[in-house]
């Protein structure tokens, strides 16, 4: 440790703690992690002493700590305390991280609110089971785009690629042009999701140059178990649960990837309460053993 200037009285760690409003325990911790080094450490006793000039550093460290910077970030910031531009860059990165964290917290609060509302609704009303119907879906001609996307919630990026390519090709939409999303993953994925979007077209078309992945596809006829979700997409779990029970109880097996048909989508109506989604699971009769 550097020795204090001749004649300068150093503060004991207790005195420095009171004046800096940082506990003795935390001052020792900051010393160990290179955040706030004492001016002098007695070799025999290990007692730490601090120059009064370090009170300014301590005050800035405390403000940065109260803003949420961790000990490693504090240690990196101390040499930058007199470099406003460098410190600003650190704080702007921290601010961006806090914004991301606040958005995640807000989403969790909304989820808790929905759970509370669901409990209240259950207490006040009789539980109405989701009705599942068996439907024969005829063969259909579709414009298709399949790709891996970051999460299922990023489905919109596929539509942003498919629809401009479709119109550039001069393709006409079919009589039933409700958008469809097919989920090809065999299990649920938190990331890197295999999703295909489709929309019915009236006739075959040739994708325009540069329309990477866009195809014109003849989809075969299918038999599907269908449950209707009315409202926002976070209610889809109840519909999928009902489909799972229906398939098991009626002697069917899964026969292909699940897909959604968006009868009323956010593109049609921005109000989530008005959305109508048909959740469709291709099925086939279970073969007796």
Image (cartoon, rainbow, N blue to C red):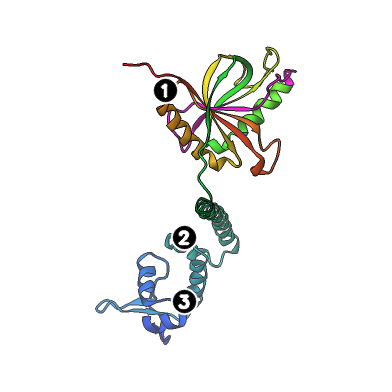
218 up-or-down from 63: above or below = above
Residue 120 is tagged as none
- Where is residue 63 shown, x and y percent of the image? 52, 70
Q: Residue furthest front?
A: 126
Q: Say whether residue 103 is visible.
A: yes
Q: Which residue: 35% across, 67% down?
A: 32
Is 108 or 13 nearer to us in this picture? 108
Where disc 3 sits, the SS reads helix
Label 1, on which residue? Answer: 253
Q: Which residue: 56% across, 60% down?
A: 91
Where disc 1 sits, the SS reads strand
Q: Residue furthest left?
A: 44
Q: Say whether residue 1 is visible.
A: no
Q: Quadrant of residue 98?
A: bottom right
Where disc 2 sits, the SS reads helix
Magenta-span inclusion, residue 121 = no
Q: Is residue 284 left or right of residue 137?
A: left
CA distance for labels 1 and 2: 55 Å
Q: Which of disc 3 and disc 2 is earlier in sequence? A: 3
Q: Is residue 256 left or right of residue 263?
A: left
216 up-or-down from 80: above or below = above
Question: Do tag 2 and tag 3 residues touch (Cβ < 8 Å)?
Answer: no
Is 188 or 101 nearer to us in this picture? 188
Residue 54 is tagged as 3
Residue interval drawn in magenta: 168-196
Q: Is residue 238 left or right of residue 43?
A: right
Is 156 or 223 nearer to us in this picture? 223
Q: Which residue: 52% across, 19% down?
A: 223
Question: Do tag 1 and tag 3 residues touch (Cβ < 8 Å)?
Answer: no
Label 2, on which residue? Answer: 73
Q: Which residue: 71% across, 26% down?
A: 164
């Amino acid at each position: 440790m550097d020795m204090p200037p001749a004649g300068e009285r150093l503060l004991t760690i207790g005195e420095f703690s009171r004046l800096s409003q940082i506990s003795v325990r935390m001052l020792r911790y900051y010393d160990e992690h290179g955040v706030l080094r004492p001016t002098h450490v007695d070799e025999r006793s290990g007692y730490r002493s601090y120059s009064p000039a370090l009170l300014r550093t301590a005050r800035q460290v405390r403000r940065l700590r109260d803003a949420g910077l961790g000990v490693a970030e504090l240690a990196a910031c101390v040499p930058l305390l007199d470099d406003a531009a460098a410190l600003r860059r650190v704080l702007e990165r921290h601010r961006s991280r806090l914004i991301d964290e606040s958005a995640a917290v807000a989403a969790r609060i909304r989820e808790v609110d929905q759970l509370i509302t669901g409990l209240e609704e259950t207490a006040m009303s009789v539980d109405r089971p989701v009705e599942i119907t068996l439907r024969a879906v005829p063969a259909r001609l579709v414009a298709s785009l399949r790709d891996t996307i970051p999460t299922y919630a990023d489905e919109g990026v596929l539509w942003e690629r498919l629809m401009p390519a479709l119109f550039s090709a001069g393709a006409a939409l079919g009589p039933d042009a409700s958008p469809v999303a097919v989920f090809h993953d065999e299990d649920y994925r938190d990331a890197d999701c295999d999703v295909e979007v489709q929309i019915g077209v009236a006739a075959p078309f040739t994708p325009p140059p540069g329309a990477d992945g866009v195809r014109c596809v003849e989809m075969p006829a299918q038999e599907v178990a269908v449950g209707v979700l009315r409202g926002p997409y976070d209610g889809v779990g109840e519909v999928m649960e009902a489909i799972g029970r229906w398939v098991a109880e009626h002697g069917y097996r899964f026969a292909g990837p699940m897909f959604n048909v968006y009868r009323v989508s956010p593109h049609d109506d921005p109000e989530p309460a008005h959305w109508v989604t048909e959740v469709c699971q291709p099925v086939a009769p279970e073969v007796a053993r």
